[in-house]
Amino acid sequence: MPGIRYGASQTTALSRFHGAGVRGRARTRWMRALLEGLGLVACSVLCALSCACQEREPSQAVEPKPTSDKGADVPTLVGVLRQSDPERRGAALRALSGLGPAAKEATPAIIQVLGDTRPASRVSGGPPFHITVRQQAVWTLCEIGEDVVPPLIEALRHEDEGIRVGAAMALGGSLTFRPKGAIPALIEALSDPSDNVASQAAFALAAMGSDAEAAVPPLAKLASSAKPDLRHAAAWALGAVGQPAMAVLADLLSNGDTRTRVTAAAAFERMAHAKDDTGWLAPAVPPLAQALSHEDPALRAQAAKALEKIGLPAAPAVPPLIAALSDGVEEVRLAAAAALEGIGPGAKDAVPALTRMVSSEKGLLRRRAMWALGHIAEAAAPAVPVLVEALRSNDPDDRWSAASALGGIGRAAKHALPALEAALSDREQKVRSFAVSAIGDVSPDRRAACSAIVGCLGDSHRDVREAAARALGFLGADAKAAVPALRRALKDDDELVRFWATRSLEEIGKALAKDSAGSTRKPEDSDPQPREE
């Protein structure tokens, strides 16, 4: 924004924001990462917020001159908003944003600039991109708070299309409150003659989540539109509504265009991720399984990702997931292996195919197959010889992944104990850490496991010592011999080692007390509580 100058009457209002210290490359990059990750309505809102991260030219700096009454700045800033210069509008909006609820009286003036899509500022610190007046206005309205909701609802019926678009964006853009009272007006806006307004209304309803259940029928109607952008927006919103939209999303996944199908599959992924119990998503499994054979690789990969999050209830999709392990697109193969990992014990039929992947693939694909075998658990016992071989790989990531998988298989992998004990001397600390944990899970003799693990409390790396301290607690009374070493670990330099040493001593103590209940064992024999030596 070179060349901008502020008059004396505007300096106080604008300086409060510019003097707040919200600038710098690090924060700009942080915001850019959020923008790339979130997208849609949140992208617009965070894009406006990222204005606060822009680096300013030395000639533009304004020294902060705080006033005792924040509201006194508002009329001045409203006057700037009424000027036509987009950069001055942006500066005024940023200042109003800093005032928060005290800028309430500026709401009508801010709404009037929601139709201005000209650049208000440029964010630096990476590939440049511009923030529009509308985006900054949306963020400012969200910062003012819930008092802006009634005028925004009214603005949804404004004659200016741009203002209607901006009003919908603002109603769906708050990170601090949900304007549930706007839901009926947003449902009405789904029928707006402007596609942009209807799309933004759908995204705003998505921000309401399950509170927008009443929007499912009109969103379903919008999802059947002949216009791809409207179908996409409707599918996204239906996914945000959640369970009440299940049947509609399943139909879109089976019968929609490719982009809408991908959006529907992503919706199921988000729905599964939001709840621990995913059994209610079982009706989504057949259309997701069918999508694994679709011609579009993006849809195949997204369907697999959704099945991964659904987990064990997605077991009926194991056969097509096994077929997807041979897909010609690596992203699909990776997603299929991850889905089998998520399904866990229900994917036991995939053990032969995953074992072949461990033998034939390299890099992340090989490791994904190993992780899946570990989650399938004891049914993956036939893969133990191949995993033992991987434990000797030149790639340290393969070695720790193999140790992790063997630990997941548990006592069915007991024949891998010699290889795991040898891995306690591996040059890579991560391999040693996973080997420590795996020995406790694999060994049928818990006292022998204690003997193998206890020496790792003296390892040179804190992660290995932490893994050893944690693993000993799971051995219960059979780790009694480790009590002296665990007490010494209470003085370890690392706080996590001390934490797990304390927890393990408590667990061992409880187990010994339980074993000695009703016996004549001396109290001190069953009292390895944390104490200084």
Image: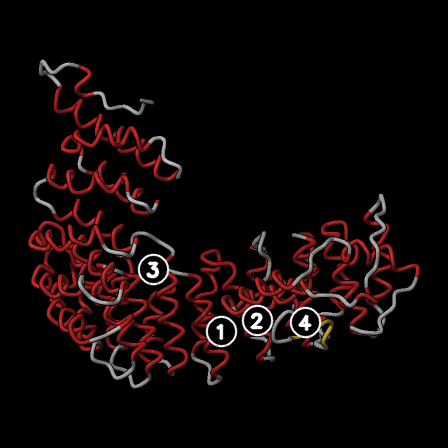
> Which circle marks residue 155 in the picture?
none
Q: Is residue 444 above or below residue 244?
A: above
- Mark closest to the chain's N terminus, 3 or 4: 4
Looking at the rendered structure, the kind of residue marked 2 is Gln
In the image, what residue type sits under mark 1? Ala
**218 left or right, relative to 153:** left
User: SS class of the residue under badge 4?
Assistant: strand
Tell me residue 457's x, y (percent).
Answer: 27, 39
Nearer the observer, 457 or 39: 457
In this rendering, the label closer to the viewer, 3 or 1: 3
| Residue 272: assigned label | 3
Q: Which mark is residue 200?
A: 2
Q: Is residue 230 left or right of residue 112?
A: left
Instruction: Residue under label 4, please give it.
Output: 131
Tell me how far mark 3 sits from mark 4, CA to CA: 34 Å
**Count of labels shown?**
4
Judging by the rendered image, the residue that carries numbered circle 1 is: 233
Indicate which disc, 3 or 1, sits on the residue closer to the N terminus: 1
Q: Residue at x 38, y 83 (%)?
A: 257
Q: CA distance from mark 2 to mark 1?
A: 8 Å
Q: CA distance from mark 2 to mark 4?
A: 18 Å
Q: Nearer the viewer, residue 273 or 438?
A: 438
- Amino acid marked by disc 3: Ala
Q: Earlier in the sequence, mark 3 or mark 2?
A: 2
Question: In the rendered structure, are the residues bearing label 3 and label 2 in contact, judged by CB atoms less than 8 Å apart?
Answer: no
Q: Relative to 479, is 58 above or below?
A: below
Left/right of residue 499 with respect to residue 336 in the rendered view: right
Quadrant in which the C terminus is drawn: top left
CB contact under 8 Å: marks 2 and 1: yes
Q: Is residue 233 visible?
A: yes
Q: Nearer the viewer, mark 3 or mark 2?
A: 3
